[in-house]
Amino acid sequence: AQSVTQPDIHITVSEGASLELRCNYSYGATPYLFWYVQSPGQGLQLLLKYFSGDTLVQGIKGFEAEFKRSQSSFNLRKPSVHWSDAAEYFCAVEDTGTASKLTFGTGTRLQVTL
Amino acid sequence: GAGVSQTPSNKVTEKGKYVELRCDPISGHTALYWYRQSLGQGPEFLIYFQGTGAADDSGLPNDRFFAVRPEGSVSTLKIQRTERGDSAVYLCASSFGQGLGYTFGSGTRLTVV
């Protein structure tokens, strides 16, 4: 069964600093990979997704992620964090079989200090 | 509609009661999913509909949970004999299909007291 690990439960960065959130997955084939962001009391918003092709994908709000097959990783990055980026971030892998369901990591809470 | 709508946004119920949670997906989305998110956790898959039929209900925790989508649009998640452990945010998502991205609703926060 597929699984997703987000090793960092909580990260604090200063506004303007760079950010990297880690995500490792376990899946038998080439996965579909996603990053979602969740603000308090809100639903999940898709930041970016990887299906195939270029391993560096660009998303909304200045985020990008790099798929590294050899490391089973899909880390999220942003060169300069804004205070409004404070939220919970979830990495997810989609079952590419018939079920088409997402398996999420436990999330990383990002705090931004001014 | 423009997004996935879930009602109610909050529901408080007494242990042992029956509850229904509603999801109105994006018009035209054939796939509909229910997830449950407990405090401090990522969402966990409950059930997936393709059209009117439940294509995968492997995530439903027990037979107290049931979901329907009779006309291939609106879905209702039904929980019988609620327990305090059922307290969570229930999220609905819809999609045109596999690999095409999901749109999530804002969720229903269920509290069983």
Image (cartoon, grey):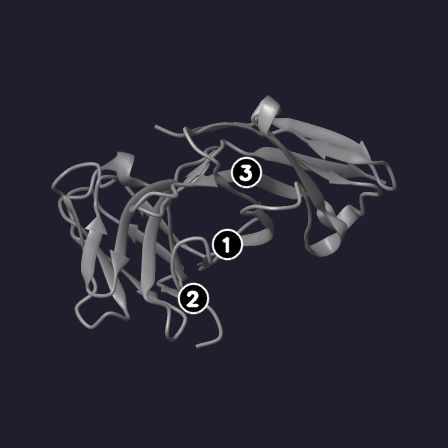
Judge left or right: residue B37 versus residue B54.
right
Same subunit, tags 1 and 3: yes
Marks 1 and 3, how far apart at CA: 14 Å
State yes or no: discs 2 and 3 in contact (Cβ < 8 Å). no
User: Looking at numbered disc 3 in the image, what kind of residue is underneath it?
Assistant: Cys
Q: Position of residue B65 (x, y in %)?
A: 18, 46
Dot 3, how many residues are within 10 Å of its Cα: few (below 14), some (14-19), or many (20+)? many
Which residue is nearer to you in this view: A46 or A10? A46
Which residue in the structure is indicated by mark 2? B4
User: Looking at numbered disc 1 in the image, what kind of residue is underneath it?
Assistant: Gly
Which residue in the structure is indicated by mark 1? A43
Which residue in the structure is indicated by mark 3? A91
**Residue at figure coordinates x 45%, y 33% from the top left:** B41
Q: Chain of mark 3?
A: A
Same subunit, tags 1 and 2: no
Q: Residue B25, located in which quarter of the rendered image?
A: bottom left
Which residue is nearer to you in this view: A34 or B69? A34
Q: Position of residue A21 (x, y in %)?
A: 67, 32
Marks 1 and 2, how far apart at CA: 10 Å
Q: Is residue A39 visible?
A: no
Q: Is residue B78 visible?
A: yes
Dot 1, how many residues are within 10 Å of its Cα: few (below 14), some (14-19), or many (20+)? many
Q: Nearer the viewer, mark 1 or mark 3?
A: 3
Q: Position of residue B57 (x, y in %)?
A: 21, 45
Element on which disc 1 rests:
loop
Q: Chain of mark 2?
A: B
User: Looking at numbered disc 2 in the image, what kind of residue is underneath it?
Assistant: Val
